[in-house]
Amino acid sequence: MVENRTDAVDELLEIRDLTVELPGTGARRPVLDGVDLRVRRGEVVGLVGESGSGKSTTAKAVLRMLPRDAHIHGRVGVAGRDALTLDTDELRELRARRVAMVHQDPRSSLNPVRRIGDFLTERLIHTLDRPKAQAYAEALRLLEAVGIVRPAERLRQFPHELSGGMLQRVVIAAALAGDPELLLADEATSALDVTTQAEILAILREHRTGRGLGLLFITHDLHLAAAYCDRVYVMYAGRVVEERTAASLFEDPRHPYTAGLLACTPELGDPRPIRPIPGRPPSLDDAFPGCPFVARCPVAETACETWRPVARELPDGGRVTCRRTDLDHPAEKVLG
């Protein structure tokens, strides 16, 4: 469980002991299992891990976008309110004005037969109650704010007439339309080239600074998270296995899984060979009586097979969910 903090008033997002189970799927374990996570006002928080680790499910839980038959336990606090207990009107207000989400593929958010202007102004008119003239003016301003030149021309165009980077800017503009307090970016830059990615990240950082926006940045790229985020959470098999400041995580990973992610990511000037994490990521069919990483861990012991994962505090204020905290550097055998 997350300990009491004096800065709770600044926490836009505070997830406590969140567990999500999907009945009827044949799953033998929860999609999320006791997840704790927080995002403060003006903070960029990274959420990293392999595909299927639970990153996107965590973000969807914030907006109550999970299946209706999902069994959800815990708390998802957004600016002091539990999103899991909101009624229909309160949930609509949360999605319209307080929290916004940007997905990986912008084309999935846009109707291919409607113009960009329709996408932006219809939300401003029907969701945020703007008059048509004001909605058009705001749409122009939003496109300019995300670095789109000739915004009036872009409003008349269809999605297929814009590049992927331009469309991602449009989707970000729509997300910012309601002046949200919290932005959830789910692999929002992974499909872009490096130059465009840098431009999108700069736009998000600018709005984070100017608006006091909290940003949950979901990515599979640990190096990007370390460079861009203030703090980083690492997920594995539906659990948070490490929470650190970005600098500490990159320089001194304390969980073998975190070290494994770093070891299999190429980096310029690093002579070490790329070493993939052995084995495969777990599926929902895999149940674990103990640590879920035990079969792939280079420092595992027999006792790890039955050890119930518990987060342990680190001297730097971070946390790690690993039994082998008896080692000075439990990740050394991974990084070499």
Image: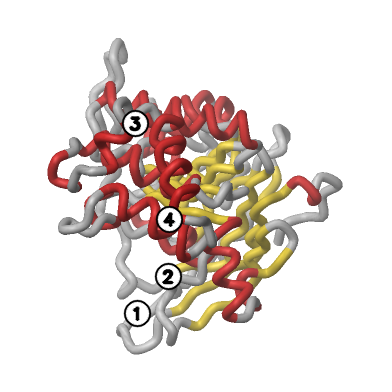
Nearest to N terminus: mark 2 or mark 4: 2
- Locate residue 293, reporting x and y percent: 41, 55
**Label number found at residue 263:** 3
Q: Residues within 10 Å of mark 1 (few under 14, many from 20)?
A: some
Of the 4 image quadrants, the one containing the C terminus is top left
Q: Secondary structure at mark 4?
A: helix
Nearest to N terminus: mark 3 or mark 1: 1
- Contact between marks 2 and 1 (CB within 8 A): the answer is yes
Q: Amino acid at mark 1?
A: Ala
Residue situated in front as seen by the camera: 180 or 66 = 180
**Where is 327 relative to 29, above or below?**
above
Residue 193 sits in quarter:
top left
**Label number found at residue 117:** none
Residue 232 sits in quarter:
top right
Q: Amino acid at mark 4?
A: Lys
Q: Residues within 10 Å of mark 4 (few under 14, many from 20)?
A: many
Q: Secondary structure at mark 3?
A: helix
Residue 252 visible in the snapshot: yes
Residue for badge 1:
27
Nearest to N terminus: mark 4 or mark 3: 4
Tell me the residue at 40%/49% (across/down). Answer: 102
Q: CA distance from mark 4 to mark 3?
A: 21 Å
Of the 4 image quadrants, the one containing the N terminus is bottom right
Tell me the residue at 44%/38% (across/down). Answer: 142
**Label number found at residue 31:** 2
- Contact between marks 3 and 2 (CB within 8 A): the answer is no
Q: CA distance from mark 3 to mark 1?
A: 30 Å
Relative side of 123 to 246, left or right: left
- Locate residue 61, reporting x and y percent: 51, 67
Q: CA distance from mark 2 to mark 1?
A: 8 Å
